[in-house]
Image (cartoon, coloured by chain):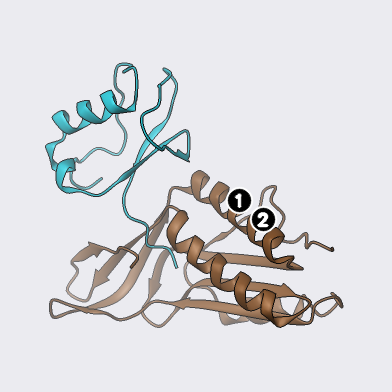
Amino acid sequence: MQEDNDNKSMGKEYFIEGPVNPQTIADSISAHSTKINIGAHDIFLGQVRGDMIDGKLVKAIEYTAYKEMADNELTRIREDIIHKYKLSCAHVIHSQGIVRTGEICLFVLVSSAHRQASFDGCRELVELIKKEVPIFGKELFEDGSHQWKENQ
Amino acid sequence: MEDIGDEQIELDLLPDLDALKNELLLKYPALKTRQFIIAVNKQKANGNIALKETDEIALIPPFAGG
């Protein structure tokens, strides 16, 4: 089984400052064209939702992470999922700092020989990111107030 | 944490995590109303564990990634 090395466990950077640019996603897809063992990709994109909470609209989320632990957890989770579903590769990019409503805050790309492994691997990877990785979100409202978000 | 006002604190060595929790709740009663998990040296701690002097303890609020 060939494993990808751009998302290597040593020194991997999962976090970027601000939103995930759609161009980054396009470039990541293109980068796989030489990997001819791949037959399927599954992509998950998390987008900041403009929730209305007590009459106030969320205009952005400010993300922070307990960085070292978050990096360790992401590496562990990603490697587990690659092995479990025999994936060709898996990539995770998460925002830190301010991401406005409608912008992308999480990009997950999972690739495999056949579609079922991509579907299942991507879903489980996203669920684990939400459950196991110490990332925090401060919902910023239009009136300048804020509240801390909690995953459902 | 916003509630307790301090980002980093140093405490005298306590024997284990339960003792530390009690000490923190005494010092910062606002924590009683808050949900958090505890990490020791950047790993989620399950149950009561013995502590060493140089351990880094983190109180971690609910996750909101993605």
Query: At 30% across and 81% down in the image, what residue appears?
Result: A50
Residue at point 32%, 55% (across, down): B62
Q: Residue at x 33, y 16 (%)?
A: B13
Q: Is residue B38 left or right of residue B54?
A: left
Q: Quadrant of the C terminus of chain A?
A: bottom left
Label 1's element?
A: helix
Q: Amino acid at mark 2?
A: Glu
Q: Which residue is mark 2?
A: A79
Q: Which chain is cyan?
A: B
Query: Circle 2 — which element?
Result: helix
Left or right: residue A116 versus residue B31 is right
Q: Is residue A27 visible?
A: no
Is B39 located above or below residue A96 in the figure? above
Q: Residue at x 71, y 74 (%)?
A: A111
Write down the quadrant of residue A100 in the picture.
Answer: bottom left
> Residue A86 falls in which quadrant of the image?
bottom right
Visual hue assigned to chain A: brown
Q: Which mark is residue A76?
A: 1
- State which chain disc 1 sits on: A
Real-space Cα distance between discs 1 and 2? 5 Å
Proximity of marks 1 and 2: CB atoms separated by less than 8 Å: yes
**Towards the viewer: A147 or B36:** B36
Residue A93 placement (x, y as % from top left): 57, 66
